[in-house]
Image (tube, rainbow, N blue to C red):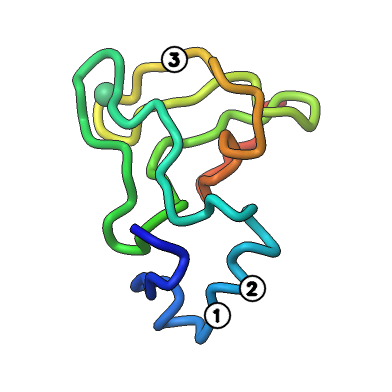
């Protein structure tokens, strides 16, 4: 995929590639790993929205994502990439 790609999310929200790059970085059109659940191997890429969005659920403890949860098997796995790419999910659950 190139940065000229128009994803389903962009169509729906009328977002330009420039705007995507502004929010998600120049490499926004690439899904960042992990691409599959380490437990059940479910595909974590969000094909309904397209890149950079992913389906894993971020578990927020004290305002930081402590770990991820698989949307399919509900098992937790470690954040192994403390990069902006790790926040390419809209699924955040706050636990106290
Ligand atoms: Zn899973």
Name the residue carrying label 3: 77
Q: Is residue 64 above or below residue 40?
A: below
- Residue, far right: 62
Q: How many numbered circles does the render carry?
A: 3
Q: Is residue 6 above or below residue 40?
A: below
Screen quadrant of the C terminus: top right
CA separation in Å, label 1 and label 3: 33 Å
Are discs 2 and 1 less than 8 Å apart at CB?
yes
Screen quadrant of the N terminus: bottom left
Q: Callout 3: few (<14), some (14-19), or many (20+) C-alpha neighbours within 10 Å?
A: some
- Residue, far bottom: 14
Q: Is residue 12 above or below residue 60?
A: below
- Residue toward you, 79 or 51: 51
CA separation in Å, label 3 and label 2: 31 Å
Give the residue at x 39% y 26%.
34
Quick check: 35 left or right of 22? left
């Amino acid at each position: 995929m190139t940065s000229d790609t128009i994803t389903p999310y962009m169509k729906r929200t009328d977002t330009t590639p420039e705007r995507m790059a502004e929010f998600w970085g120049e490499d926004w059109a690439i899904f960042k790993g992990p691409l599959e659940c380490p437990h059940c191997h479910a595909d974590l890429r969000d094909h309904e929205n397209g890149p950079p969005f992913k389906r894993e659920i971020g578990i927020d403890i004290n305002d930081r994502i402590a770990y991820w949860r698989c949307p399919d098997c509900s098992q937790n796995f470690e954040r192994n990439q403390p990069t902006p790419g790790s926040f390419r999910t809209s699924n955040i659950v706050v636990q106290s």
